[in-house]
Image (cartoon, grey):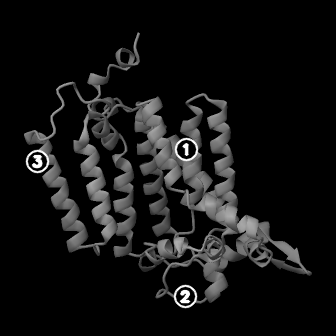
Amino acid sequence: MSFKDKFNFEGFWAIEENKDFKRFTIDNTILSLSIAAAYFGWFFGVVQFRVEHWILFYLVVSLYYFNRVTRSFCKSMFPFAIFWVFYDSMRLVPNYTVNHVHIQEVYNLDKYLFGIYDNGVKISLNEYLSKYHKPIFDFLSGFFYINWIPVPFLFGVFAFIKDKLLVYSFANNFLFVNLLGFCFFYIYPAAPPWYVAEYGFVENFDMMGNMGNLKYFDAIVGKDIFKGLYQINANVFASMPSLHSAYPLIVLYYAMKLKNKWITFGFSFFCVGIWCSAVYSNHHYVIDVIGGIACAMLSIFLFNLFLKKPMIKYIMPL
């Protein structure tokens, strides 16, 4: 039995287009124009429009209309685009305007649980690593950290090639863990470790995002990579939970379903690398990382419960 016959691709609206693929049907045109109107209306009329908004739009449109395979890929990975729109829109209502920002209590708790004595004085693990950072770890930290989105996206590409059913669950669970994390950001706004290093425990809501110890990576490679990224950071006080730490666990969970020991090992290594980098880079406390891991586990649990609902099979091929 062929792979196609086994999964009956025609029975799933977005896994495989039928053989009579047509680019500009009435339905496709209406759908595209409606989404474009909403998208540009939102970013031009509400959120400040930037060049990356054009890039995202043209990437999605190009994939949707190029051929039936890219259209299937576009539909299956569309949750990544939705995530980016949600994340970028958070700048409209900063979480520090919704709830009190927790600065000192997070720092004190992390130092109490994971602090290290240095010359007889207990300091946080972040402070210790900042004080005794090494070039090799500066580079590795930046290398892992910059792949927080590229690796999940590339895994989605790989999963689409290997298992077109798996990629649907993965992409939607990726979106779900983000929405769950965004809720926590507003419930419990928390300052990252670099904020305490820069401003102490005083509230300062006028500053831009900060590279933290990732500045050393930029210095090593001679490019303002992280500086450019954090200048457009949509939400500075979003340290708890660490979604940087949640993403690789979501990837690992779905990678294990491919039942390949090398793939599982590779993504396990990536998990540990991201978790260590989050603390070493001074962007997250250890408790933030633990919170991110817990967020990922909760997302997987709730999402799997969601998949058991009978109506789901009529909505998407999960």
Q: Amino acid at mark 3?
A: Ile
Q: Residues within 10 Å of mark 3 (few under 14, many from 20)?
A: few
Which residue is identified by label 2? Answer: 203
User: Quick check: 101 left or right of 77?
Assistant: right
Q: Please tell me whether mark 2 sits on a helix, a strand or a loop.
A: loop
Real-space Cα separation, disc 3 to disc 2, in angstroms: 48 Å
Q: Nearer the viewer, residue 155 or 297?
A: 155
Report the quarter where the N terminus lies.
top left
Counting from the top left corner in percent of width and height, residue 97 is at 42, 79
Q: Total number of numbered labels?
A: 3
Question: Can residue 71 be seen?
Answer: yes
Q: Residues within 10 Å of mark 1 (few under 14, many from 20)?
A: many
**Closer to the eye: label 2 or 1:** 1
Which residue is identified by label 1? Answer: 251
Return the residue found at the far front: 222
Q: Nearer the viewer, residue 101 or 52?
A: 52
The label shown at residue 30 is 3
Q: Residues within 10 Å of mark 2 (few under 14, many from 20)?
A: some
The label shown at residue 69 is none
Give the residue drawn at x 80%, y 75%: 132
